[in-house]
Amino acid sequence: MSVAANRSFGEVVIETSGLAKKFGHLMAVDHISLSIREGEVFGLLGPNGAGKTTTLSMLATLLKPTEGTAKVNKHDIVKESDAVRRSIGIVFQDPSSDDILTGKENLYLHALMYGVEKNIREQRIREVLRLVDLEDRADSRVKIYSGGMRRRLELARGLMHRPKILFLDEPTLGLDPQTREHIWEYIRRLADQEGVTVILTTHYMDEAERLCDRVAIIDDGKIVALDTPDQLKQIIGGDIVRLRIKNPKLSSIKELPYVVKVEQTDGFVMLTLKNSSAHLQEILGLVGNAESVELRTPTLNDVFLHYTGHEIREADAEGGFFERAARARSS
């Protein structure tokens, strides 16, 4: 699965200007400005503590900004919060469906809460269950659902009232690879067939790369890069060659016109090469005897490293923001 090329989008449905949120001395979101169009799948990519969830929470009116403004579906998130909430659906990281109810009962309860008209409730429940392939488990209690089924039910619930915009906070966190692929398919279907605008947070590079039309790389509360995944990867300027080598002869290659970047760390040499297939053998002959050679195309992890100086580690997915916030409040 890959994002469709040359997709066209509608009008701007989310727009922020200088949006900021401060907790004590910690600037969690640092004056973010962006615009998102109808039908886009837009990703906020970064480690926990970067400001992704805080940004989502402000756009969903769960947090008030410290500075700046934002409009969601043309409604101000502070002055018209009720109108914003009627326009959006949201799926949190942690499951919030009721274990003792069936999938269908959870959806019916959500329909009541959001004022879905009585004469279309049953029809709408069937529609969203069909969309996420849960029709055959509609009458099963949620407590016996798998993690992937529960996540799909959360997606269905967020769509019950036909929102124009869907917020997803780490939608595949903790799921196995096959279930993640299925969730990606459902999300793309929402955008491509239902016209829903999807804004998701993620720390998974492959999720941002394969699912999102555009990605904002966010670190320490700031957007450091924003573009399509392909355009972002082109910033690296070539393929990545990783060599394990002792005493490399780097002076002889640094000035070559097709060598974009040379880095040396922990017994490895990282080279960025233009047209690597034509020049790799020459490079290997000049640099010395390598114990191992790895050649790959750039990833969003390389882009993140390029802009921030560090990688997103799996451990960054847990606990980082609250630890930083606690330190800020105590300082």
Image (cartoon, grey):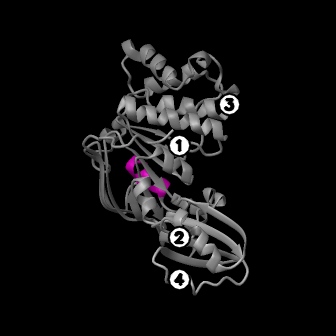
Gap in angstroms between the C-alphas marked 1 and 4 = 48 Å
Q: Is residue 326 visible?
A: no
Q: Which amino acid type corresponds to the residue marked 3 in the rendered image? A: Ser
Residue at (55%, 24%) from the top-left corner? 106
- First in sequence, mark 2 or 1: give its number: 1
- Compared across the picture, whether 238 is left or right of 35 comes to right
Q: Residue furthest bottom?
A: 251
- The residue singled out by tag 3 in the image is 146
- The residue singled out by tag 4 in the image is 254
Nearest to viewer (mark 3 / mark 4) = 4
Secondary element at image label 2: strand
Q: Is residue 321 visible?
A: yes
- First in sequence, mark 2 or 4: give its number: 4
Task: Specify the segment rendered in magenta.
Answer: 52-63
- The residue singled out by tag 1 in the image is 92
Gap in angstroms between the C-alphas marked 2 and 4 = 11 Å
Instruction: Examine the residues drawn in magenta and state their main secondary structure.
Output: helix
